Amino acid sequence: MAEYHLRKTEKTTDDQEVVDKVIMTGKYMSLALCLDNEPYVVTLSYGYDREKNVLYSHCAKKGHKLDIIRINNRVCGTVIVDGGYIQGECGQPFESVVFRGTVDEVFDLDEKKHAMSMMLKHLEDDPGIVQKSKLDEDKRYNAFGILRINIEEIRVKKGR
């Protein structure tokens, strides 16, 4: 895909510390998929593994999203940290991450456990509660799918 440059370069960075801060602050990502020139966007909760440079998300084991991914696994996504609209100023402070890469289904039990651990650490104040009550047995991991988004390119934009 052609690379586009922002006009206001002072508002964007690929500094890993800034990228990590936005990803760790956000709770949801919007993921854009495309099949046969038909776009599809889905919003998902996620967990971030900085060392592997991937985002993990859980999903159903069947559905439109998976049908698309199995044919075209190229994705573009965004995480937004919204500072709230400022009335009377037509302004809105925000930070957003835009990333591109590929998405793969995860079938390996150990990676599924790792993925859920990353998501629970990211989303839950006490991840152990969910871990013990819902993921206490290996067979429970058969009930859902896991997606791994392999980040190839990522940038942060700040606005106000």
Image (cartoon, rainbow, N blue to C red):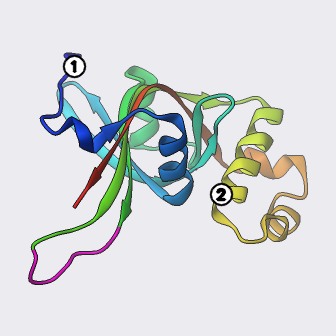
Could you say which quadrant of the image residue 61 lies in? top right
Write down the residue under mark 1: 3
Q: Amino acid at mark 1?
A: Glu
Q: Which mark is residue 107?
A: none
Q: Residue 156 appears in which quarter of the rendering?
A: top left
Residue 32 placement (x, y as % from top left): 32, 39
Q: Secondary structure at mark 2?
A: helix
Work out whether residue 37 or residue 90 is closer to the camera in this orientation and state it: 90
The crowding category of the residue bearing disc 1, from other C-alpha atoms within 10 Å (few below 14, some 14 to 19, many at least 20), is: few
Which residue is tagged 2?
A: 122
Residue 56 placement (x, y as % from top left): 60, 41
The range drawn in magenta is 83-89
Left or right: residue 1 compared with residue 122: left
In the picture provided, is 18 more to the left or to the right than 38?
Answer: right
**Which residue occupies 42% across, 24% down?**
73
Q: Residue 121, position in %: x, y?
A: 72, 57
